[in-house]
Amino acid sequence: MRFTKNFIIVETKNGPLSIPCKIANAISSSSNGLTCMSCRDCNGDIGMSYYCKSCNKGREGDILSKSDTNTAIRVDKENKIPLTDELKDSISVSDKVIEVLGSITDQEVDQDRILGSFAVIPDDKTPSQIQKLFTRLQVGLVNSNSSFIVRFNTSSKQKLGILRAENNILVILNYAFSSDYTKHDQDSNIQLTDEELKVAIDFVNKIKPLDIDSITDIRREKITQIIESGEVISVEPTELVPDVDPFASDPVEVIADKLKDEAKADKKPSVKRGKKV
């Protein structure tokens, strides 16, 4: 887990209170990096093809690297503003700030809008008196029924979050903006009888309890076993030219008949073997 320096900014009657901290993504999908694209002929790596749609640089065999590109803000379909170093700095001023906007009770948090979480710990490079500000904030949240609504930035994107205390650290729940969230309500007029309701509840109660931490990523385990076994499966190049032109003007039935005739012509006659005496 890689922590980066940050600051929790809380507005008080005496002015903004800045609490140094470090933040890291608490959830990672470790299986995503285990598989990749490879060439069917040589098993080589497959990369993305970068080329300019205007001048075609990189399309005709030229090498177009990241140094040949700029980050830009799109104004509309035709116009964009290249980001200079000064503009990038002005945008990233708030990247290291966790801005406390207000409070929210635990009951008000919509679990459906939680996208992930980030761990927040005190910055151990700061003096102990400064670190005590973090501890006081953490203890205050632990002993209350409230969390903080915060705005923060990671991966060049602004996010909405719920800052809450958990164990001896703080956690930011990545919370979907209302504009990005679509609630799907089910409208149903189906009514259950008392007996049907009892059967439904009994069915759910029969499912055995399970320790959720005992669940493992089976797909990752299988891929890891393949890696550790050292077995390499080579894929033979396949013929990419179709026997029948898929864009032919013949109807599907005619193409199918042609394939059947070709299959019959290629079929070798069976050889009958005589019985051994």
Image (spheres, rainbow, N blue to C red):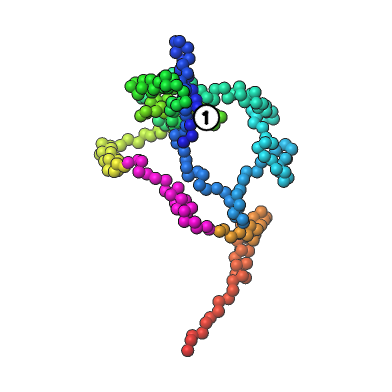
Q: Is residue 168 visible?
A: yes
Q: Is residue 110 visible?
A: no
Range shown magenta: 211-233
Residue 27 falls within the magenta-colored stretch: no
Task: Please determine whether, in this image, residue 193 is positioned above or below residue 254.
Answer: above
The secondary structure that most of the magenta stretch takes on is helix
> Residue 51, percent across and down?
69, 40
Q: Residue at x 57, y 49 (%)?
A: 37
Q: Residue at x 51, y 44 (%)?
A: 33
What crowding class fits label 1: few (fewer than 14 Cα within 10 Å), some (14-19), or many (20 or more)? Answer: few
Nearest the viewer among 248 and 77 is 77
Q: How many marks?
A: 1
251 lies left or right of 94 = right
Nearest the viewer among 173 and 93 is 93
Task: Please determine whether, in this image, residue 226 is positioned above or below residue 276.
Answer: above
14 lies left or right of 48 = left
List the single residue furthest toward the bottom: 277
Q: Residue at x 36, y 22 (%)?
A: 139
268 lies left or right of 12 = right
Disc 1 is placed on an element classified as strand
> Residue 109, percent across and down?
40, 26
> To which quarter of the image does residue 267 belong?
bottom right
> Residue 52, percent across and down?
70, 38
Disc 1 marks which residue?
154
Q: Amino acid at mark 1?
A: Thr
List the single residue furthest toward the top: 14
Q: Residue at x 47, y 38 (%)?
A: 28
> Residue 214, percent across and down?
35, 43
